[in-house]
Image (cartoon, grey):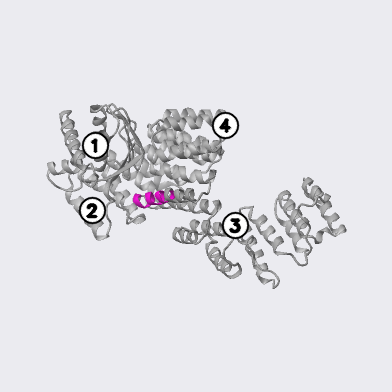
Amino acid sequence: MNTLNPKSSHPIFKLIEQCKNIATLKQVHAQMITTGLIFHTYPLSRILISSSTIDATISYALSIFNHVTNPTIFLFNTLISLSLSRKKDDQTHFALALYNRILMQTTLIPNSYTYPSLFKACSSQPWLQHGRALHTHVLKFLEPPYDHFVQASLLNFYSKCGELGVSRFLFDQITGPDLASWNSILAAYAHNYFVYYESNLDSVYDTSSLSLEVLLLFRQMQKSLTCPNEVSLVVLISVCADLGALSQGIWAHSYVLRNGLKLNRYVGAALITMYANCGRLDFARQVFDQLLERDTYCYNAMIRGLAVHGLGLEALELFKKMDLEGLVPDDVTMLVIMCACSNVGLVDQGCKFFESMKEDYGIEPKLEHYGTLVDLFGRAGRVKEAEEIVQTIPMKPNAVLWRSVLGAARVHGNLEVGESALKQLIQLEPETSGNYVLLSNMYASLNRWDDVKHLRKLMKDQGIDKAPGSSIVDIDGSMHEFLIGDKTHPDARWIYVKLDEMHRRLQEHGHKSGTREVLFDIEEEEKENALTYHSERLAIAYALIASDSGAPIRIIKNLRVCNDCHTATKLISMIYEREIIVRDRSRFHHVRNGTCSCLDYW
C-alpha cells in the first residue's frame, strides 16, 4: 500500500477534519475511493481515526478496514489503539483479535507501536495472562534496545499486576531512561504502596519502605539530569504525604512554582493531601484557595483533610460551597463527608448523607460507605446497630467493616459484640495481629487474664507477631524514628533523662497510668514502665529537647495510639505548653492545652 506524506497539504486532510457526522464522512470516504486515495496509508488512517471519533462504536472504522486488501502494520496499530480508547473489556478482546490477525499475516511483523496500547489494556483482570504472553512476543519480534514507550508500558503492566520486583528489574535494564520511564517506575512504587497498604494494614514498615524508595529514585532521576514534570511531582508529593515528610513536600511544591509547572487539579489535590497528612492544614487550605480551577477532585482532598483533623463542621461548610459552585459530588465526596460527620459525632447528618447518595446523586453505596456508616453508629455507642448493619449489607462484608465493629465494641465495652466480630476477622484475616490485640485489650481491661493468655497463645501457635510500635518525629526537616524502649538514638541518654522528668511531672498532675490495656498480667509498676517507654513518649521527649519551645511537635505513629499515651499526651501539652500533633493509623490528634481534636474517640 502506498503512503502519502503526512505533512502534505492535500485538501482531503482538511475535509476529513471538518467531518462532524457519519454522513459527511461517508461522502469523503466515497471521494477517496474514486480518486484512489483510499490506497494510501496515511489518509486511510486519518479516516479511520475520524470515523472512530464520530461513530458511537468502532463498527464503521472496522468496515473500512476490512475492505483494505493488504493493510499495513501502521493501519493495524491505528485500529488497535482506537479500539482500546473505548476502555471496555469487549474492546480489549477485539484488540487482541486484531493482534492475532497480525500474527497470521506472513508479511507483517509487530513493531514498537503495536504493544504499548495492548499492555495497557491487559493490566487488569481477566487479561493479565495475555499481557505476560505479549511480553514473550516483545522478546521474539523486537530487537533490543527497546523503544522507551514499550519499556514504560511493560513497567506499568507488571506494576498493575503487583509484580514490583519485575518492574524494577526491567527499569534497571534501561540505559539512559527517559522521563516516561522514570515516571513509570515512580508510579509503580506509588501504586504498589496503595495496594499493599489496603491489604496489609499492619505492615507499616513495608509500605514506608516503598515510599522511601520513591524518594531515592527521584534523587537518582535528578542526578541523571532528567527534569521532572507534573506527573513526577504528583508521585513525589503523594509519597511525602504517606511519610509525613513535610520538608520534602515543601521542596516539591516550591519546585512546581520555580519551574513554571502547571498547578493542575492533580498536583493541587496531591499538595492539599500532603499538607493535610503532615499536619499543616493551614497550608492545605492556602493551596486550595489559590487553585484557579477547583473541581470535585480538589474538593474531595480538602474535605478529607478537614475530616481527618476532626474539623467536621468546617468540612460540612466546604461541602455546601462545593454544591453552590455547581459541582456534583462523586462516591469519594460522599465517603469523606460521611467521615467528617463520624469524626465529630454527627450521626443523624451522616445518615442523611448516606441516604442521599442514591436518592439525590444516583451513587450506589460501596463497602467503604457502609464502613463509615458502621463507624457513625459505633462512635455513638450504638454498637449492636453497627453490627446489624454489617450483617445486613447487600455485599459480603470485608475485614475493615468487622474491625470497625470490634473497635467500637472495645471503646464501649461490649464484649459480646467484640468476640463475635473477632471470629469473623479471624476467618477473613487469620494473620493480622491488630485484630487479636484489640480483643486482648478488652479482656485486659476486664482483668480476664486467662482469656488474654489464651488469645496470645492462639497468636503464637499461628505464628502471628504483634507489629512493633514505631513513632517518627520531624525536627527541622530531619526524621527521627523510635521504637518501644529504644536506646539507639545518639541522644538516648538525654532522652531518658527527659522521660523521667515527664513521668514525674505527669504524676504531680494526677496522672495514673492506664495499665488495664497492657497485655501481660504483670505487676502494676512494671506495666507503668512498659507504657512510659512507648515509642511516642520517646519521640515527644526528644522533641522537647531538640526543637524550638514554640514549635508544634509533629509525630507519625504506625499503630493506633494507646489510651494511656493519649491521656499522657494531653497532659504533656498542658504541662509543657506545647501543641502536639500525632498522626496514628486511624486519624490525626491535635492536642492543645490538655484537649484532643478526636474527642477521645479513635
Residue 93's tag is none
Which residue is located at x 18 percent, y 48 percent? 520
Q: Where's residue 358, x and y in %?
A: 53, 39
Which of the two marks, 1 or 3, is nearer to us in this view?
A: 1
Q: Sequence order check: which comes first, mark 4 or mark 1? A: 4
Residue at position x 27%, y 26% from top? Answer: 577
Mark 2 or 3, nearer chain start: 3
Report the disc number at residue 541: 1
Which residue is tagged 3?
89
Per the image, the residue denoted by label 2 is: 455
Could you tell me what secondary structure mostly forms the magenta stretch?
Answer: helix
Q: Amino acid at mark 1?
A: Ala
Residue that carries the numbered disc 4 in the rendered image:
292
Q: Position of residue 429 (x, y in %)?
A: 35, 55
Q: Residues within 10 Å of mark 4 (few under 14, many from 20)?
A: few
- Tell which tag, 4 or 3, sits nearer the viewer: 4
Q: Earlier in the sequence, mark 4 or mark 3?
A: 3
Q: Amino acid at mark 3?
A: Asp
Local secondary structure at mark 2: helix
Measured in 3D between alpha carbons, the distance from the residue under mark 1 to the one under mark 3, in whole angstroms, is: 56 Å
Mark found first going from the N terminus, 2 or 1: 2
